[in-house]
Amino acid sequence: MKKYYSIIILLAVCGMSFAQADGIKFRHEGWDEILAEAKANDKIIFVDAYTTWCGPCKWMSANVFPEKMVGTYYNNEFINVKLDMEKGEGIAFAKKYQVRAYPTLLYIDGQGEVVHKSLGSRDADKFLELGKVASDPNANLKGLKARYVSGTKDASFLRQYATTLMLANMDATSIANEYFAGQTDWNTKENAEMVFELAGFDLENKYFKHMLAHRSVYEERFPDIFDQKLEGAIGSTLGRDASMESTTQMYQKYYPNTWEQKMGEFALRKKMYANDEASKKEFLEGAVAYIHKYQISDWSFLNSMAWRVYEISDNPMYLMEAKNWALKSIQDESNFFNNDTAAALYYKLKQKDEAMHFALMAVELAKAEKADYSETTLLIEKINEL
């Protein structure tokens, strides 16, 4: 089971439904037929561009598309289509409309032109809001582009246009540059959010340089993800085959007070998924030493380390250490993932009662989080055999 908790994002799993009693009713005709109908009736087509392995896609199918209020609006306003980007007509569709991330939510007119687009999952209220924007010729991407070409350039409009482009994962640089050229304070709440997004993962990007020049502002405003952003940019700059020397220099530059700890984690992660026995041993010894030395408390990091120990070791000494990390992770933030990890480790330690306690807790949390707990169910069967 995968044990990592993603930032953008949270995700549920359930089967894809192509029609819902009260929710969105998706059509099954061929794309050309749908286009012809949209053109004849002056309707917009909503396309859920998904893949079968995409967690956020499954979450929306289970939790958003079946909602009655969503169905009422979308069934009235749009012709609704689901297309698997890896099968049938979806393959050509993905190429034509440059669909590279999932879910991509597209709104297309009868001419086959995209009038609006957005990426990623959202709850029912936000999805309804997205549909209303897509229906508004003054607010959707097509309408914003037309207004821009006609000469609308006031600050509020430029900000709206740039933000909408970013949500669609489209290049917003030129519009954003126009907007920020007229801004005297880039660090207001609204502007900082744009700067953070525009910075990408490029240390040489002017928006990234601005963030670093005002680092305390952005660390305070984005406390949970600023470090992830910076480390992602460092990794992007260094590349996959970076030497320890160049990596050390980079961390010394951007983390002058904590570079040693950062390098310790870097070295640990490099060995984390090695398959040779020597590297596995180095990882196990290094993880114990690192977590003890720096008194790590971050639930996600502890959980990922604990799960890796479960995967590669049968040594009771390391399993006990990992079990303690899992318990500490649960203390920080109890969720399906770390309870499942604790259950697995107690199982390997042959402590049946504790293993069952955390396995059942994991199942309850999975139900609440709408996560897939099928592997935990299998683990419970094994625990019962102890």
Image (spheres, helix red, strand yellow):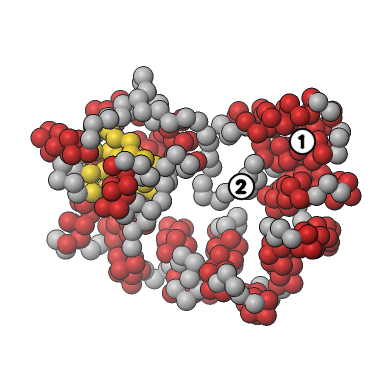
Horizontal side, residue 48 vs residue 375: left or right? left
Residue drawn where x is 60% and y is 55% of the image: 224
Element carrying mark 2: loop
Q: How far across and down, in percent of the image, does residue 4 sit? A: 63, 48
Q: Amino acid at mark 2?
A: Tyr
- Residue position for label 2: 5
Q: Amino acid at mark 1?
A: Ala
Which residue of the protein is positioned furthest toward the left in this rendering?
Answer: 40
Quadrant for the N terminus, please.
top right
Q: How far across and down, in percent of the image, does residue 229 sit? A: 55, 63
Looking at the image, which is closer to me, 262 or 132?
262
Horizontal side, residue 335 vs residue 98: left or right? right
Near mark 1 (Cα within 10 A), the count class, few <14, some 14-19 or many ≥20, is many
Of marks 1 and 2, the one in the foreground: 1
Element carrying mark 1: helix
Q: How far across and down, in percent of the image, does residue 306 sit? A: 75, 48
- Residue position for label 1: 343
Residue drawn where x is 34% and y is 51% of the image: 99
Residue 266's tag is none
Quadrant for the C terminus, please.
top right
Residue drawn where x is 79% and y is 29% of the image: 383
Give above or below for 139 relative to 293: above
